[in-house]
Image (cartoon, coloured by chain):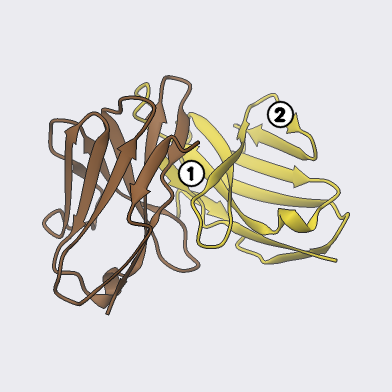
Chain colours: A brown, B yellow
Amino acid sequence: GAVVSQHPSWVICKSGTSVKIECRSLDFQATTMFWYRQFPKQSLMLMATSNEGSKATYEQGVEKDKFLINHASLTLSTLTVTSAHPEDSSFYICSVTQGFGNTIYFGEGSWLTVV
Amino acid sequence: RKEVEQDPGPFNVPEGATVAFNCTYSNSASQSFFWYRQDCRKEPKLLMSVYSSGNEDGRFTAQLNRASQYISLLIRDSKLSDSATYLCVVITDGSGNTGKLIFGQGTTLQVKP
């Protein structure tokens, strides 16, 4: 069964609205989760590192005020795309790393389409 | 220069063929290496980890050359079901379980009947 659950799988929203994507670690506690974005025919690009109980760490070029990350519990991180625009349409996916063996689990991903 | 580079392909091969993918990484301090498989519109799934000694899992063989900062994946006896995008993934910031993944662009494989 899934180790990391991501919701929603698909979302269509109007330009200017906000969309929240959830990433849940089902089998273990995760102090750190990662959020990636993948545009068509491109690689996954790390957006930010979500840290439980503290501020997220954003990669260069990612607007922290636009992509709000909240990691309020050890099993849930949320990514909110605020004031979404069509260019934000993408595949967003989270990952969780377990243990020192670096076993990495991905969520199922969320397809966002902004119209 | 990208941190992890792959030839995007596509590689079009007949069933039963042997195909090899290469990947180079720029950060010599990189610590862990993986090959992931991604099917269209799906999340990446771990294919195999890559070790300096080389490792094999059935029809798949992965090699790591730290001196050349080069990783390879060999697929023998290709099956139609091997058609996918293969992602070279590197962890460069270990810190125990907080490593960040750096993805290559991916190499697309199409296996034809």
Q: Quadrant of residue B101?
A: top left
Vertical arrangement, residue B75 with respect to residue B98, above or below: below
Q: Is residue A24 left or right of residue B91?
A: left
Q: Position of residue B98 (x, y in %)?
A: 34, 29
Disc 2 residue type (three-letter): Gly
Q: Position of residue A92 (x, y in %)?
A: 35, 56
Q: Kindly identify the residue that appears in the image at 62 percent across and 58 percent down.
A: B107
Q: Kindly identify the residue that appears in the image at 15 percent across and 70 percent down.
A: A17
Q: Quadrant of the C terminus of chain B?
A: bottom right
Residue B30 can be seen, yes or no: no
Spatial CA distance of label 1 from label 2 is 20 Å
Give the mark nearest the N terminus, 1 or 2: 1
Q: Position of residue A8 (x, y in %)?
A: 33, 56
Q: Kindly identify the residue that appears in the image at 81 percent across and 63 percent down.
A: B13
Q: Which residue is mark 1?
A: B26
Chain letter of mark 2 equals B
Q: Kindly identify the residue that appears in the image at 47 percent across and 63 percent down.
A: A42
Q: Position of residue A15 (x, y in %)?
A: 19, 77
Q: Nearer the viewer, residue A103 or B100?
A: A103
Q: Is residue B69 left or right of residue A90?
A: right
Q: Callout 2: 10 Å neighbours few (<14), some, many (20+)?
A: some
Disc 1 residue type (three-letter): Ser
